[in-house]
Amino acid sequence: MRLEGKVALVTGASRGIGEAIARSFAAEGAKVIIASRKIEGLTAVADAINADYPDSVFPKACHMGHQDQIDELFSWASETIGTPQILVNNAATNPYFGPMLDTPEGAWDKTFEVNVKGYFSAIKAVATRLIDEGLPGSIINVSSIYGLRGAALQGVYGMTKAAVVSMGRTLAVELGPANIRVNTICPGLVETKFASVIVNTPEFSKVYTDRDPLGRWAQPEEIAGIAVYLASDESSYTTGQEFVIDGGYINAG
């Protein structure tokens, strides 16, 4: 029960990595607010987790690319459940797959709106509340190994994930005096709906598995463990760091 008595907010939690993190947080005793664009998917996730950990998960629809919805989400959270001391920025989009120079302007804008501005807006909303209330906090941003290396055919997505890494490092320095920690998880290929184009296309997935020392991609649950560690007091002296969870892919070859 490493998170007992704490309130967490996980974005992009209607499936995949976000769902796995929400379940792990609930298992550790946290009250978990889950957010995503559509309430139907969130409700199904909340019902499933609450069946195992009663009254632990609370769904709230929110488009992380819309500032008004982000403001409403955090106001609702503080008034209804409590100010989140743990924030997991996981919601992301990648509407274009192909050569970077051919990226449509609309896809460029949407990717930065959700993946970078949405993350920053959520951090600002939670950090200002924590500072006002004199509470410590842990902010966990989900980036990608493609924020640390070249991202062929996913160039703009990779740029946003590199921005998330930079954001985390700077905010760790600026928020440290308030006892708010900021860390970044950089997963490799994970079997989710988000990554289904790569996972389900043999010529793409084979490029990854042939290079990966473990010879496979990850399951969402294999990312959740590091999130629990970073959310808990076990990581109380850890901030401004990137944690690569990729089966060794980034260091191979």
Image (spheres, rainbow, N blue to C red):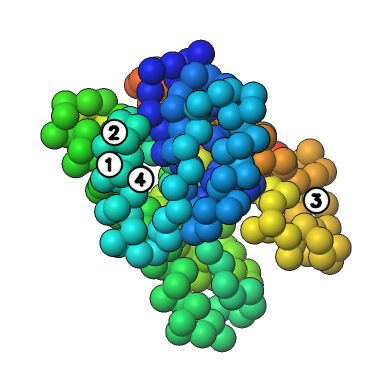
Question: What is the three-letter code of the residue carrying label 4?
Answer: Gly
Q: Nearer the viewer, mark 1 or mark 4?
A: 1
Q: Are marks 2 and 1 in contact (CB under 8 Å)?
A: yes
Q: Earlier in the sequence, mark 4 or mark 2?
A: 2
Q: CA distance from mark 3 to mark 2?
A: 41 Å
Which residue is label 1 attached to?
A: 126
Question: What is the three-letter code of the residue carrying label 3?
Answer: Thr
Q: Nearer the viewer, residue 228 or 56?
A: 56
Q: Are marks 4 and 2 in contact (CB under 8 Å)?
A: no
Which residue is label 2 attached to?
A: 83
Which residue is label 3 attached to?
A: 209
Q: Residues within 10 Å of mark 3 (few under 14, many from 20)?
A: some
Q: Residue at x 66, y 41 (%)?
A: 220
Q: Nearer the viewer, residue 190 or 37?
A: 37
Whether residue 121 is visible here, answered yes or no, is: yes
Q: Nearer the viewer, mark 3 or mark 1?
A: 1
Q: CA distance from mark 3 to mark 1?
A: 38 Å
Q: Which mark is residue 168?
A: 4
